[in-house]
Image (cartoon, helix red, strand yellow):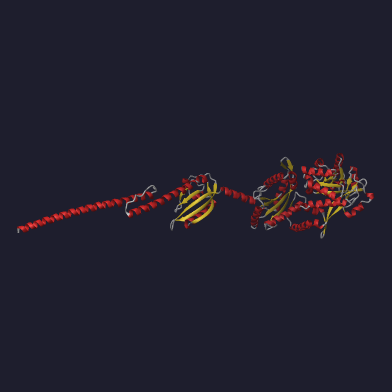
Amino acid sequence: VAEAVERGQALAAEARDSLLAAGVAALGLLALAALALAALLRRLVLPVQRLTAATTALAAGDTTAAAPGRSGLAEVDAMARAFAVFRAGALRLSESEARYRLLAENAADMIVQHTADRRRAYVSPASRSLLGREPEEMLAEDFAEILHPDDLEGITTAYDHLMRHGGKITCCYRLRHKDGHYVWVEAHWVATPLDGARTELVAVVRDISERKAAEARIAHMAHHDALTGLPNRVLLRERLHEALARARRGEVFAVLCLDLDHFKAVNDTLGHTVGDTLLRLVTRRLLADARETDTIARLGGDEFAIVQSSVDQPRDATALARRVIEALREPFEIDGHQVVVGASVGIAVAPGDGAEPDELLKNADLALYRAKADGRAAWRFFEPEMDARMQERRLLELDLRRALVAGEFALHYQPLMNPRTRRVVGFEALIRWQHPERGLVSPAEFVPLAEEIGLIGAIGEWVLRRACAEAAGWPGGIKVAVNLSATQLRAGRALADTVAAALKAAGLPAERLELEITETAMLQDTDEVLATLHQIREMGVAIAMDDFGTGYSSLTYLRRFPFERVKIDRSFVQELARERSEGGAIVHAVADLCANLGIATTAEGVETEEQLQRLLTEGLTEVQGYLFSRPVPATEVPGLLAPAETASAP
């Protein structure tokens, strides 16, 4: 039993030792496990914590935050690599944002960002140069407060549409500068939806004030005359359309067409610079005589038109026409020259005289043509029969253009007589037009038309050549007198060449040719004209002043031009029968003056023996008129040249 007890005790002791050893071993294993777990935590948790901190810093904008080094754990290393990629992207984004911010901060265009709640989130510094406003001011300013009132509705509608639907547009509008004036801008708006309900908008705003000013200048040039600044035909037609619209509601208005008398003479005499200045001065006077509600337009050349609004009765238009004529009759002082012109006016009243702009202008122009035909410096209202006369005139113009080629012109000759011997000393060549249907057309009808349409030069040259050719067949002592037009005189040296060529072709001695020049033609008083006249005189051709006394400067021309003869106008000769008439006094004075100057004299329009005797008393050296003969065809000239009736010119 004792042995058994001892064995039992021994086994118990051995069991305790085994349990103790096992416990110690278990504790060791636990310690090892704890150590292993601690090591694992150091390798896993710390890198994750560092990644978390770096990610947080990077998200806050710190692009210097770095990821931990390799941990040896695949998962952690994968996270670190992902962080590195994210950081690289963030760096690129930051650099990109920096570049774009640099561009935005330094761009000439103003850049504006609008948030989804339609507030400005960003305004670039260009707001200072564009609008004189700091970006901070712009952020606080209500857009509607600086937008031009006329642009508010359209721009607000476009803005609302973009913010609802997204997209992009380009629009132009005006923004108020801080100093109060408005600046034209062109804005490119781009709206980007952020989600189903919100949109962000970015606007790039550019100053286009200079472009708008250039467009305005171009538009003004397209609608205004460059020389005078007045409306041109285009704008005039628009104003007429507007006036006609008012006329349909009962308003009456007048259209006045006017042009200047003798403007071409001013241009040719004093040059285009003086002519341009004259047109500007005429414009000033027209503006002074019209109302602000009236439209004054320049149609071209020396032609103007006035749209007179709200005409209650015809005398309103008459009063304006009278004021215009009186104002333009006064002399103009230009560069030391006293320039005198006049004006004629044609009037059409709407809506009675036309329902379209072109019809009104045409009818006013017809009335103008009548005013000029009636003696200039006058006004005339349009009458329906004027249109028929104008149609007839147009047909006559077409016929006149072909008449020269068709050989329809002929010369008639009126004898120039020695009043003492009553013998023929020469003939004045006078053109006649034998129209195939109309018969003989009066020079008073077709010569002004030829001047107007530019044919007078060619016709005048034909007259000169034909007269020289026919005179070459007359007796040697008989001269031929040919009238020169202002157009021919303006040709300068070409006229002298034409005269020389005509004499040579006909074989006519120069001393048998006399050229007659009216005072109107001599308004072209230039050095070139003087040189031309002297050149013609040097050939041996005589030069006469025709219609002496009918102008304002006849005596001046006697001093300036090398005249050999003066022809006294028939209007003075007709008064010789009356006692103490003004015409008689003028004839006496001219005859006395020319005798003292050594200039021969011719009296035109002698019809009675009494007139002839009075002219003999005054000592005139030559006469012509119906008392002796009407103008006759060339075939009848020999009958007037019977030996008993001819003599050499004095």
What percent of the width, then of the height, locates residue 565?
A: 85, 44
Which residue of the protein is positioned furthest toward the right in this rendering?
A: 644
Quarter in which the C terminus is drawn: top right
Q: Residue furthest left?
A: 1
Q: Is residue 381 left or right of residue 572?
A: left
Above or below, 591 relative to 166:
above
Q: Position of residue 57 (x, y in %)?
A: 37, 48
> On the picture, is 27 further left or further right than 525?
left
Q: Is 367 displayed left or right of 637 in the figure? A: left
Looking at the picture, tell me which residue is in the foreground, 434 or 386: 434
Furthest-top residue in this view? 596
* Total numbered badges shown on the rendered structure: 0
Is residue 480 in sight in this rendering? yes
- Residue 443 image point, x, y percent: 82, 53
The answer to whether residue 552 is seen in the rendering is no
Report the residue that reaches farthest toward the bottom.
Answer: 437
The N terminus lies in quadrant: bottom left
Give whichever of 92, 621 is nearer the camera.
Answer: 92
Residue at 30% x, 51% y: name it.
Answer: 43
Q: Nearer the viewer, residue 335 or 19?
A: 19
Q: Position of residue 358 (x, y in %)?
A: 69, 56
Front-most of 98 and 375? 98
